Amino acid sequence: MFFQKENISTEKLQTVEVKVEDRNFEKLGQYMKAGTYIQLAADPLIGIIEDVQIKENKIYLLDKMNRVICYDMQGRVLFKIDAVGNGPGEYANINSFAVNEKDRELVIYDNHRLALLFYNSDNGKYLRTKKFSQPTPCAIASADGVYYYDNPYHNNYPNNPALHYSLLISANGEDIMQRYFPHQPAEADYHFRTTPQPFSYNDSVLYYCKSFDNIVYELQPNGLKALYEIKTPNPLPLSKIEEKVDEMEIVKSSYSLGIENIYQCENLLYFQFSKGGYLQIALYDLSRKEQIYCGKRLADKSGKGVPIHRLINGVYKNRFWGYLTPETIEWTLKNESKEYPEIFRHYDPETSNPVIVFYEVVK
């Protein structure tokens, strides 16, 4: 592994070892309990969700219709950025977005026009556009007023070795000030990612795990802190990357791929990875240093604590949270006989938008 050793702390690195199992998948209610539900306003009707971030008591949602919709914590629409076009403040495509809480800005990366577009994060008002031809990141994030770019490839700038790094850091969004994890030829030339979303928001703390790696880092303006070394069963060997094995063959193989959606709340650590063509969900007790569950799904047998099975999407104000899509709610109500809260009794998946649910850790 290559990085700037002087800026990465490994003093508190904790090993987390998991194995896939097919039992105890209905124990989730023993560890977390649904406390608050937010029904997002029905207008506009949301397409396929690309990303959701919760910051400063606002919910920011990016969907497949190339727009960012901002809601308050009651689910009411505050504003939307829906500006595909050629004029000022307009874009061709939203590859990724980030909310800079310190400067109260929302920044969109348009990977078609190679530009950053800045908007006011409180009201969605357009502020400015900056050309951003290099690097061409796959994902962006922001924490403590600093911007982070996931940059696994350098095909567009082969003669600029200063940008041949997987993680790039900028204080203003434009100028790269720090860089970590130099590209290794086998990975940079292989356009297959094991970690589609490398950034994970834990309240105001940002976690990062690059593709083909198993170390989880906390990102800080003055350096990185290595938190967890997650040892998954039968990890993808470097030889397969060097051979550039067919992507679908790897996805369906018995190898464990990628670490993503890493969230810590109280003593619980949640994360995901792929194995055997399925998404594996892991819940780990950090205080006892033992696995609670690792498999294809988590559920609550009674349906009272966690009524509908769904993945975790973040941590906000010391609570796990996740979004429930209409498709998830519809399937669950039809196929599982459990007790459900009032919000789902008259839910119409044809005309309703997703529900945000917050889970408290059971102590």
Image (tube, helix red, strand yellow):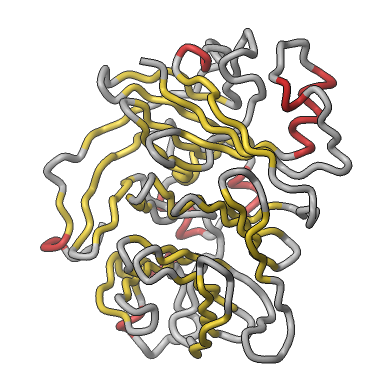
At x 53%, y 32%, the residue is 358
Along the line of sight, the residue nearer the viewer: 361 or 10 = 361
Q: Is residue 100 visible?
A: yes
Is 167 placed above or below 247 here? Answer: below
Residue 285, quarter of picture:
top left
Quadrant of image for the C terminus: top left
As drawn, is 339 to the left or to the right of 114?
right
Quadrant of image for the N terminus: bottom left
Is 194 placed above or below 229 here? Answer: below
Q: Position of residue 113 (x, y in %)?
A: 61, 86
Total numbered labels placed on residues in the image: 0
At x 22%, y 35%, the residue is 14
Q: Position of residue 289 (x, y in %)?
A: 27, 21
As drawn, is 351 to the left or to the right of 41?
right
At x 30%, y 83%, the residue is 162
Along the line of sight, the residue nearer the viewer: 199 or 256 = 199
Is 323 placed above or below 71 here? Answer: above
Q: Position of residue 75 (x, y in %)?
A: 65, 46
Q: Position of residue 317 (x, y in %)?
A: 39, 39
At x 66%, y 81%, the residue is 91
As drawn, is 47 to the left or to the right of 214?
right
